[in-house]
Image (cartoon, rainbow, N blue to C red):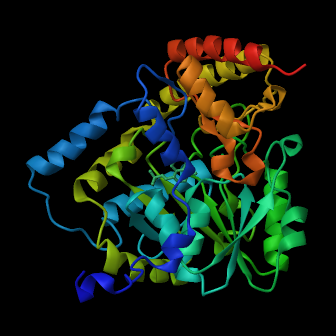
Amino acid sequence: MSKAEEKPRRNIISRRVNSIPPSGIRKFFDLIATSKDILSLSIGEPDFVTPWHIRDAGMRSLEEGRTSYTSNSGMIELREEVVRYLKLHHGVSYDPASEILITVGTSEALDLFARAILDPGDEMAIPDPYYVAYPANIVLSGGVPLRIPTREENNFVVKASDIEARVTARTKAILIGYPSNPTGAVASRRELEDIALLAEKDDLLVVSDEIYARLVYGMEYTSFPSLPGMKERTVLIGGLSKSHAMTGWRIGYVAARQEIIQAVTKIHQYTMLSAPTMAQMAAIEALRNGDEDVKQMDQEYNRRRRTIVKGLREIGLTCFEPRGAFYAFPSINITGMTSEEFSERLIEEEKVAVVPGSAFGECGEGFVRCSYAASLSSIEEALRRMGRFVERYRKG
Ligand SMILES: Cc1ncc(COP(=O)(O)O)c(C=O)c1O
């Protein structure tokens, strides 16, 4: 054995990266990839193709030879469209020149924000169950996720009193995401007002991930920064992936007061430079002329939502009524299985894929996430198979 081979190997992966688990969703997708003929209720993206006129705008931008970087902040025309859209659908006004940054998906916006505000050891509160990227972004930024439990009896909406009970001197921000992935919960105006009062009292910043804002069914939607006095305190994060069926285009945005936009832009200009130009051109078209498409997709999701919730209840699973996004989050308690066991066996025995609730945090245990971004016929067949499965394993 040569000398070089005897030397202990240097641990080249950082402690920070080693400390985060691989996404529980990905692990599950790998399992699905190895089985054939799976009916999937596990996908977290629209099953619609981006509407034609939006694709066409992307293609036209290539034909016109628009292949260079844009301004770091994103094209001013797109920022103006985002501002118009936020005024119309979120009821809040921003300045396109100084209060908007166009990002590579909402994912980049979430990462930038955590890096811009957290010093080592600073805490950010996140309601549990959470979107898988939230704690990872916080940890990768040197921060500490402060997990706030939520419960089915409160429709999985975080209570301000539960946040208040856990906040410490190191807590800098609260990260909320309504409508929620994975539960489909939507917070009411009243519930958000309670969070606003707490943010004011404890001088906390609120990051509101409103990527599913356009997919809300049968209730009024309140955008957090539209609450009195909250615009200055809120970092609004959004994107076109879900509303306009544009996941692959990678367009998101951050809207916040100038000081925060300057900080996130500093990181963005060194890491991304600018969001893809072709995608920005398509996003302008989506925001200008895509409202009818959004409404149609929304109606279709709502139809599927009613079918899946009714179906899950009929096969004996309790399921609170999701009011947004495209997820139902039924309890699987009557089977006595863990959510991972349930999901693995359901794939093996009935070839239906759902995601174990435990992938989204401790409070997700005992539940599974069923996405209804799938055709009505797939949903109906998946429900038949799940019905057989639950019947086999129902306790007592
Ligand atoms: C709550 C939530 N935020 C952010 C994202 C990331 O979206 P984007 O495609 O804009 O990066 C997702 C995607 O699933 C999500 O569910």
Q: Is residue 113 visible?
A: no
Q: Is residue 39 visible?
A: yes
Please state which of residues 9 and 235 is positioned toward the viewer in this rendering.
9
Count the marks: how many? Answer: 0
Is 13 above or below relative to 357? below
Please state which of residues 367 and 47 is positioned toward the viewer in this rendering.
367
In this rendering, position of residue 277 left or right of residue 128: left
The location of residue 303, given as percent across then percent down, is 61, 19
The location of residue 95, given as percent across then percent down, is 48, 70
Image quarter of residue 223: bottom right
Residue at the spot 49% in from the left edge and 52% down from the top edge: 85
The location of residue 49, given as percent across then percent down, is 35, 31
Residue at the spot 71% in from the left edge and 35% down from the top edge: 329
Is 246 above or below relative to 207? above
Please state which of residues 254 and 331 is positioned toward the viewer in this rendering.
331
Q: Quadrant of the C terminus?
A: top right
The location of residue 291, given as percent across then percent down, is 46, 37
In this rendering, position of residue 335 left or right of residue 93: right
Please state which of residues 23 and 100 is positioned toward the viewer in this rendering.
23
Q: Quadrant of the N terminus?
A: bottom left
Image quarter of residue 371: top right
Residue at the spot 65% in from the left edge and 55% down from the top edge: 177
Is 244 above or below relative to 65? above
